[in-house]
Amino acid sequence: MPEAFRGIEMLPASRLPGQLFVLLHGAGSSDIALLAEKLRAAYPEAAILIPDGAFPLTPAAVHELVRGAQDRLNVLPTDTAIAGFSQGAVVALEYSKAHDGFAGRVLAFSGRYATLPDEAPELATIHLFHGRDDEVMPVEHAWQAYQRLAELRGDVTIDIASNVGHELHASLVDRAINRLQTCIPLRSWQRALS
């Protein structure tokens, strides 16, 4: 039986959530509050889970957390998004490789793949957000991920902010909200056109 969730859990007041966001912090950081605040404003009907600092940031642990939350809150994988900053972004991207189909969107802020994927996720859209001046996790990693996923015909977007370093910058968070609200996955376009 999965252990009880430890961290911050924001649930809609009046009904079961229509969407689920799991937010993964960077190592030694809890700087995910801005993203949670903006998501809460844009998606008041969503559940937002932020595991505490002791949560093991591994794809397997994230999978257990996601599956448990989806079952408990009755949220579909297509209505689930995993977002991470820095190390949390690395885990979110690796999660998308290991568990395709359990989250419809992955938002990676200032992160990278541990190893570039050999195939693109079939059931997830990957959104990459990075500061051009990031000295901790150079922006080239985001470009490499974008190019690899594009070559593999995956659903991927990339947004690079000028004069931004290794931070969860408001301009990138705003862009993430815009991507969530406006981006139609490539697979949806392909189905519609065939």
Image: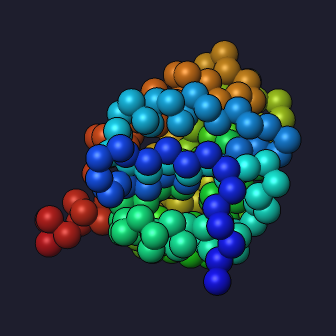
Left or right? Give the position of 153 relative to 60.
Answer: left
Quarter of the image where the C terminus is located = bottom left
Indicate the position of residue 147 as horizontal and vertical percent values. Answer: 56, 53
Residue at the far bottom: name it.
1
Left or right? Give the position of 123 relative to 33.
Answer: left
Is residue 117 at least partly visible in the picture? no
Task: Report which quarter residue 30 is drawn in.
Answer: top right
Is residue 194 at least partly visible in the picture? yes
Quarter of the image where the N terminus is located = bottom right
Indicate the position of residue 32 as horizontal and vertical percent values. Answer: 64, 36
Q: Pick whichever, 79 or 171, lies toward us.
A: 79
Residue 68, compared with residue 46, is above or below; it is below
Residue at the far front: name it.
14
Residue 83, compared with residue 44, is above or below; it is below
Q: How many marks?
A: 0
Residue 161, compared with residue 57, is above or below; it is above
Indicate the position of residue 102 as horizontal and vertical percent values. Answer: 48, 72
Q: Pick whichever, 96 or 58, lies toward us.
A: 58
Colour scheme of the rendered structure: rainbow
For image coordinates 35% across by 44% down, the residue present is 13
For image coordinates 29% across by 47% down, the residue present is 14
Residue at the far top: name it.
163
Residue at the far left: name it.
193
Task: Report which quarter residue 97 is drawn in.
Answer: bottom right
For image coordinates 46% across by 30% down, the residue present is 38
For image coordinates 70% across by 32% down, the residue present is 31
Q: Pick whichever, 74 or 36, lies toward us.
A: 74
